[in-house]
Every structure is written in C-alpha cells, then in structure tokens.
Image (cartoon, rainbow, N blue to C red):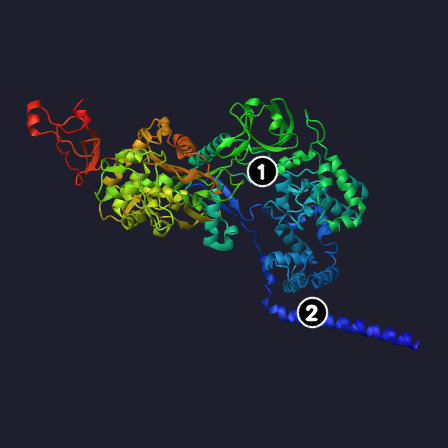
Amino acid sequence: MTFLRTLILSLFSLIVALVGATALALVGAAIYFSPGLPDVRQLQDFELHTPLRIFTRDGKLIGEFGEERRMPVDFGDIPQDMINALIAAEDASYFEHAGVDPRGIARAVVELAQSGGAIQSGGSTITMQVARNYMLTLDQTFTRKIREILLALQMEQLLDKEQIFELYVNKIFLGNRAYGIAAASETYYDKPLTELTLAQTAMIAGLPKAPSAFNPLANSERSLIRRNWILFRMRELGHIDNDAYLVAVQEPVTARRHYTQTEVDAAYVSEMARQYAIERFGDAAYTGGYRVYTTLDSNLQPHARQALANGLLAYDLRHGWRGAEQNDIASSLVEAQEQTATQGLEEELAESPEIRETARQAAERSQTQVEGVDGDVSNWLQVLERTPNYGLLRPAIVVESSGRQMKVLTRGGELHTIEWSGLSWARQYLSPRSRGAEPSSASQIAVRGDLVRVIENEDGSLRLSQRPDAEGSLVAQDPRTGAILALQGGFDFNASKFNRAVQAQRQSGSIFKPFIYLAALEGGEMNAATVINDAPIVIDDGSNTLWRPVNASRDFQGPTRLRPALARSRNLVTIRVLQAMGLNHTIRYLEGFGFAPGRLPRGLSLALGSASLTPMEMTNAYSVIANGGFQVAPWFIQRVTRNDDNELIDEATPQIACPSCAEGQETVEIDGKEYPIAPRVADPAAVYILRDMLRDVITSGTGRAALSLNRDDIVGKTGTTNSQRDAWFAGFNSDLVTTVWVGKDSNDTIAEYGANAALPIWTEFMGKALAGTPSTIPERPEAIVSLRVDSSTGYRLPEGQSGGISELFHRDHLPGFQPRRVSRELEEVSGSQGSGAPESIF
C-alpha cells in the first residue's frame, strides 16, 4: 500500500508539474508575443472591401479584381444547415470552447515534432482561422500558431460567437474567386444561400480546407468524397437525421461555373490596368473601391479580338491537325471516380467505409443520358463544364467517328454532327512547312472519348478546330494623343496570359525600314528618287564568318530608287542607306520615335529590323509618322476614381500632336482642358514624303492585299524576320495606327511572310474600324514640290522635257538635273532635247 500511495502521489505531482509548466509556458508566450499582436478591437469596425473595377473610356466594364465575389451576410441570415455543415467540417466544438481546442493543439504539437517545425493540419478552430485570415500571415510556422492562439483567446473575450462566425463566413476563400459563403453560393449554384439543398450546403462547407483540391468544378470526384464526409459528420453530431443524410449523400454533383459578366472582352488590357493599380495603390487597389477608366474604345476592341482570332485560326487551317487535347476520357462519373487518386483524402476515408460507398452511390445517381448517345455521360459533361472556352473555340468530346462524319458532345449536353466539310482540312501536321495526306475518314482524325475544339460557322454548323500553334497581337493607337484604342495580346487570355503586345520583344524585320529611310530624308542627304545599288554586300563583322545579307527574293535589281526599294522591301538598298547615313547618327535620330538606344544593335543589321521591340513600341513609332512628326507616347489609363461618388484620384494629361499650333506654343485647349504639346522630332516635309512612299507599298508593293479596303488614305509596311519567325504589318491613316504581329512564343518559324500571316488580320480590323469614316490624307506641306525625274537615275528633267516620272521633294533638297547624253548640235537638228531616258526615244 505504501508503494501504491507513493506511486499515486508521484504521478499526481508529475501531472501538477506538467500543468504548471504548461501554464507558465503559456503565460510566458503571452508576455513575449503580446506586444507585437494586432489590436483585436479593429475587428469590431472591420469593413468588407469593394473590388477594383476596370472600364473602357465610355464606361463599359472589362474586368473586376480582388474580392469582387464577396457578398457579406449577417449571422441571422445564415441557414442553420450551413452553420452546422461548417462546424462539422471545421470545428465541432466551436460553440463550447473559448477560442482554442486543446485536442487540435495537441495534434498540431505532434505534427510540429514530427515535421521539424512545420505545422500541417494546424489544429485551428474557427476563431483561430478568423485571427489568421484577418490579422496574420498564412505561413505555417510555430510562432504564427502561438500568435494565432493568443489572438483567438482575446477575440473570444471581445466578440461573441455569432460575431466571430460572421467574420469567418464572409472572409474565407472558397475557390473560383469567391470569398465568403454567399458569394460561393452564387458562383457554384447561381442562387442565394437560403435556396441551397443540404448536399450543396455541405459541398460549399467542404471547400475551406482546400478550395482547389475539393472544388466541384475542377475535381468533382474528390469533392463528392469530401461532401459526403461532412454529411456523415453532421449526422454523427446530431445536426441531421438519417433520412436527410441518406437523401443528401445520393444527390449528384450540380455545381456549374457562373462568371461575372464583362461588357467588353479586353482581358489583356484589364490585366495591364490591374498591374498599374497595384503599383499605384498597393494591395489597397483590390479593396478600396477604385475604378480605372482606360483609353480603350468599346467599339474597336471587339473588332481587334475578332480579327486576331480569325487570322490565327486561318493560319492554323493552313498548317494541319495536331491531334486531340485529351484522349480516352471516361464517360461516366463512376468510372472516373474509380480512376481518381485519393491522396489528401485520408482523414475523410478513414472516418468510415461508408464515405467511399456513398460517394460511389452519388456518382451512380449522377448518371446522365443524352438522346443519341449510348451510356452514361455524366463525367463528359463535368469535363466540358470545367474546360474553358478559348476565344471562339468551344470544347467538345467525340462521341462517334463514322465514315465522313463526327458526332460530338458540347457543354450543356448538346449533340452535334460535324460534316466532312468541317473535317477534311485536318491533314496531319508534320512540320511548319509540311502536312500529311488528306484524311479519308473521321476516325483518322479523332475517336470516342477525345477532347477536341469546335468553332461555329456562319450558318450555325460546326467545324473541327484547335488552339492555334501560332500566337499574335494587335495594337491600335490614336496617333494624335498616343492613346491605346484597342489591344489584344494573344489568341485568348484564358489560353495564355502572356501579353505579347507589351511583353514580347521580337525582331521587327522590314517594318523597321521606314525609319532608316526617314533618317535619310530628314537632312536632305537623300530623297525619294535617290538611286542606290541593289547589289551583293559582304561585310566582315568581326565574327568567324563574313556577313552576306540577301534580299528575300534572292535576286538583285541593280541601281534602284528609294521609292520602289521601300515598296519592294529591298534589304541591300536599306543597308547601303544606313551605311551612308552612319550608324551613330541614325540611332540618335531614332530616339525621337521612342526607341531606346540601348535596345538598338550597333551594326548594319539594324537596317533589316534586327532590333527586338514590342508591338506597342512599333505602333507608337508609326504614330509619329502618322501625326506628322510629333513624339507622342503610348498610354492607356485615362482616369481613376473611387467609390460610387466618383472621387477623382488621377487623370491623364498626355502630350499631344498639334500640327496647326504656332511654333513655340506649349499647350493647347481641347474640350475645355489644357494639354501639353508633344515635341516635334521629324521634319513634316520628310514625313509627308515617306508617307507617300509607304502608299506605294499598298498600291504596288508587298501590301497590295490592303487595296481590298478601297481607301486612298491608308499606308503601311510588311515585315518578315529571318527564317520567317515573325510576321508583321504596320499601317495607318491620320486617325488610327495599327500593328499586327504573328509568331510563335518558342521563336520557331511560322513558315509564312508578313503579307500572308499578319496583313489579313490588319485588313480585317482596319476595314471594320474605318467603316463609314471619311478619308484622312494630311495637308501637303508648303515646302513640298513635285518634279519629274529620270526613272533610272533619279535626276531632274529640264522643264518641259517629256518622259520620266513625277516625284515629291523638299524644295530645299532638290536633285540635280539629268546630264545631257546627246550633243546640243544633234538636239538643234532634231528639234528636241535628249535626256538619255528611254521614254524620250520611243
């Protein structure tokens, strides 16, 4: 008995000591961490935030960012089933504990010891989660856990359970940009909380643990297991009876994706505006109720998006079929669930064998039949629901490939038949320059269970398609102000968020040549009739091999005037122009067009567009030509306001081109607002002559396809880089400058020229953008004169001399006269002057 008494006393003493040590540790932790803790009282005045909204210049919504799906809800408006489901999933003793669950903390301590300092599940109560979500960082460390505990204990003293729960349900992230249970209800089920079924309620309650892993849209099989575990817990805790449980666990997945609808699709510009707002306002941009109005034109932007998509899809048709996006997709949810991994669901599956069984039964009850399709297609419909559209391309799953027809299932359970006219293009892609033989049957293209893309024809029928192998961008700018009026940075933002309009630095090719020619025209060293020899060039550039540039046509035309040389994009002529002007002089001149000298290569390859520049940079440079020589800069944020009262935060005052303003004038008033005048960086006469030369690119050069617009005021230039990696077209009239780039992100060849890949996109956009607008040809400067010159030599013909061609010149930079090639005595005998030109002989 003495031994037993001693043992009991010893154990009691040990327990008292451990409890005391724990208490002392907690007191010590409280003393140590309390000075650095946030003030819990601020939660009493916490206001939920208003999202960042982005608009076109005329107020059309193009994007929302931040916690825009948050829909605050009062505790009294939360259905009891939702309260019970969240408690069952997250904190069964929430209404009993004082902010901390000792058992959960003990589990966290064990994990801490096992993981060497990192906490996995965390043992957090709902109160502790509120402390973390509102007042702490999300890093999983021991010190943060202590701070979380201390804040939770303070919170329970200051707020009642209902207030804390209300803070919790309005803050938690539940996937798909939904914050809070009310927003999640609208996002997944498009209805308010009060209308959710018990199963839908449990599905939402299962999301806080892992909004991605248990998301019913992305992982319907895993979400079913999580949902049914919560329903099981609700029954075990007495929140629902067995009858309600049995009905709910059998309910199929009914979640669907419901988007915030924008009025204009301009996701690339919306993202640019978001980045601007973050730089300007920090994280408050997402919560402060800011409204950013861009310079986008809501009429032009849809045309830009459509034209680029059409052009890239047309390119893809020319290059062949690369195959289905996915293969062998299980048609039924039961089959898909059997194949799904269970990693991360260990806790749920260990609770009871019936969790998996009820999930399987729910999958069986999810069976969906579509008329004309054999078997259960529940998983196909789920896959189609969670697979995003790529622009005009819709996902479809092949149901049957028979003969020369293909039956496909699209979102919403619609069954379509694609006829051979929509399939025959799908010759196998072999390389950018080769395709396989034309298919003879639909089964050679895709088979049952394959995920493909389809596009709707004008008559409503479908055509097989695919995400284009090439990418592109389109930038449209107002040349007078520099404002970006339309911008599309790729085929589709959902497919790739890389904004090629502003981020892709690609060699500019021949669209850079006009700036080399303008540098020569500017000082009068050359004119449009100057003759340069189109002949081979061999240059020792310091490398191991000699540089031997060639023309794209691989031929030489000998002495050539600058005008036809630019229209036909003769490389060797442009190199010799740069040689004559001098590299350093030319680069200094190019700074006026917005080109950074450090980005321009210090070699003659600059003449061929070897500089890597963005489409926006090239568009802005062409704007300087279009506006007559004024250095405007690209901009896209018009103004920023705040909240519903439209408190003005920022407003743009760009430098604008003003050809009619007096020399020395610094500002000009437009619509009652003063704007600074942009500096002039190019002589208006030289710019006018260059513009006239670029018109020849359209009428007789590489841009002839643009004649289909039937306009006399558009000019432009095609461009193609080495190995046909980049295809460009840049063109304009006085009101609108547009640049199109087509290429591959990998920098592989697209095997097409600018006239084939980029010009059709430009033509489609400009045709719609300029429809119904008058011609805008600039007024001819007084310094410009028109003279006749010998077409072979570029020299002036004497007044009254027949033959030759008409050319534009600056009156201070006229060419010399054509030398006489016939003696004066013979002229007197014959009665006519001889110029040596063929026209004077025949």
* Residue positioned 52% across, 51% down in the render: 286
The amino acid pointed to by label 1 is Pro
Where is 288 relative to 437, above or below?
below
Instruction: Identify the residue position indicated by label 2 in the image.
Output: 26
Residue 436: numbered disc: none
Q: Please tell me which of labels 2 and 1 falls first in the chain.
A: 2
**Residue at image point 69% right, 35% down:** 330
Measured as percent of width and height from the top left, residue 333 is found at 71, 36
Kindly identify which residue carries mark 1: 388
Placement of 581 over or under 450, stated as above or below: below
**Could you classify mark 2 by the number of other residues whose Cα lies within 10 Å: few (under 14), some (14-19), or many (20 or more)?**
some
Q: Is residue 652 left or right of residue 414?
A: left
Question: Residue 555, located in which quarter of the rendered image?
Answer: top left
Expressed as whole percent of the image width and height from the top left, the position of residue 574 reads 30, 40
Q: Secondary structure at mark 2?
A: helix
In this image, 415 relative to 308: left or right? right
Give the SS element for disc 1.
loop
Q: Picture coordinates of residue 557 (x, y %)?
A: 29, 33
Instruction: Tell me if I can see residue 696 in this picture.
Output: yes
The answer to whether 30 appears left or right of 486 in the picture is right
